[in-house]
Image (cartoon, helix red, strand yellow):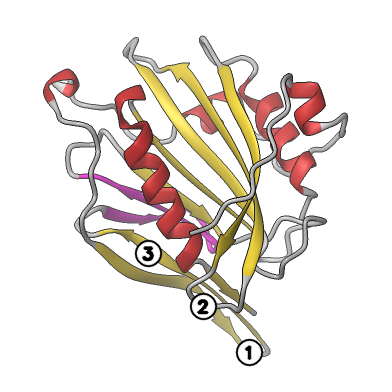
């Protein structure tokens, strides 16, 4: 995979001033990336996924067929959150992957607006802190060439008092920075940073949206 990074210091400079409501949700919903983790989490080794599985979902209505597909770690539990969104959770409940296909007629925001909306939704979350926001590009497994991404990494404290780290990415397989074509995020502990990035990268490369 090849990434073209551009880092800027400061949330305002990174994201720009953009008023949006397209992605806004409650802070609780935005922060609850997974079910509560096991109390023995500290004894678990950092995330290291060695096998992935193909998944596809969406709907098939007359003259209105939409599907989203990607790769998720093998053995993780799959749960449909809505017609376009699926969450995968590890057996130990420490890690999760969430993929939102932006279907069902939703208005797609710009990359900057999506990141701004996420930050706004999380402002009331305990110890919320943005670590980085990065522009990049990913080589697709299914489309020709590279397509743009924008990735925000942040931390917060969950209800049990544990520090959680989340990698949140917006992307567009149609190779345009203008509008979001999907969201991919993964959550875990700070020690899982490398493994979470690998899970998000794999899901990004395998991501498809058809409709």
Q: CA distance from mark 1 to mark 3?
A: 27 Å
Q: Residue at x 80, y 23 (%)?
A: 12
Query: Where is residue 142 drawn, in percent x and y?
Result: 51, 78
**For marks 1 and 2 on the same chain, the one whose residue lies earlier in the sequence:** 1
Q: Check residue 153 for magenta coloring.
A: no
Density class for disc 1 (Cα within 10 Å; few <14, some 14-19, many ≥20) is few
For the C terminus, the quadrant is bottom right
Asked if the residues shown at circle 1 and circle 3 are in contact, with their CB atoms under 8 angstroms apart, the answer is no
Give the structural element (helix, strand or loop) at label 1: loop
Q: CA distance from mark 2 to mark 3?
A: 12 Å
**For marks 1 and 3 on the same chain, the one whose residue lies earlier in the sequence:** 1
Q: Residue at x 18, y 25 (%)?
A: 38
Where does the magenta region start and end? 77-90
Write down the residue under mark 1: 62
Query: Where is residue 62 drawn, in percent x and y?
Result: 63, 89
**For marks 2 and 3 on the same chain, the one whose residue lies earlier in the sequence:** 3
Q: Check residue 80 for magenta coloring.
A: yes
Density class for disc 2 (Cα within 10 Å; few <14, some 14-19, many ≥20) is few
- In this view, the residue in front, 118 or 106, is 118
Main secondary structure type of the part rendered in magenta: strand
Considering every residue shown, the one lying at the far bottom of the view is 63
Q: Is residue 78 left or right of residue 56?
A: left
Write down the residue under mark 3: 71
Q: Residue 151's quadrant in the figure?
A: top right
Q: Residue 73's quadrant in the figure?
A: bottom left
Viewer-side label of 2, 3:
2
Viewer-side label of 1, 2:
2
Give the structural element (helix, strand or loop) at label 2: loop
Write down the residue under mark 2: 142
Q: Residue 122's quadrant in the figure?
A: top right
When the figure is inspected, residue 84 is found, relative to residue 61, above or below; the finding is above
Query: Where is residue 75 drawn, in percent x and y?
Result: 19, 57
């Amino acid at each position: 995979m090849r990434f073209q990074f551009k880092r800027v210091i400061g949330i305002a400079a990174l994201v720009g001033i953009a008023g949006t409501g397209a992605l806004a949700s409650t802070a609780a919903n935005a922060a609850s990336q997974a079910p509560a983790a096991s109390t023995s989490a500290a004894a678990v080794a950092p995330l290291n996924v060695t096998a992935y599985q193909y998944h596809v979902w969406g709907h098939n209505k007359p003259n209105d067929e939409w599907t989203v597909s990607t790769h998720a770690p093998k053995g993780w539990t799959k749960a449909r959150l809505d017609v376009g969104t699926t969450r995968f959770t590890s057996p130990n409940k420490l890690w999760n992957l969430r993929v939102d296909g932006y279907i069902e007629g939703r208005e797609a925001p710009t990359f900057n607006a999506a990141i701004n909306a996420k930050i706004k939704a999380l402002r009331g979350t305990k110890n919320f802190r943005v670590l980085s926001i990065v522009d990049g590009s990913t080589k697709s497994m299914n489309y020709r060439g590279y397509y743009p991404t924008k990735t925000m990494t942040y931390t917060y404290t969950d209800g049990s008092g544990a520090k959680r780290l989340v990698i949140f990415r917006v992307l567009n397989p149609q190779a345009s920075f203008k509008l979001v074509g999907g969201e991919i995020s993964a959550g875990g502990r700070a020690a899982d940073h490398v493994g979470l990035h690998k899970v998000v990268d794999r899901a990004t490369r395998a991501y498809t949206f058809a409709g």
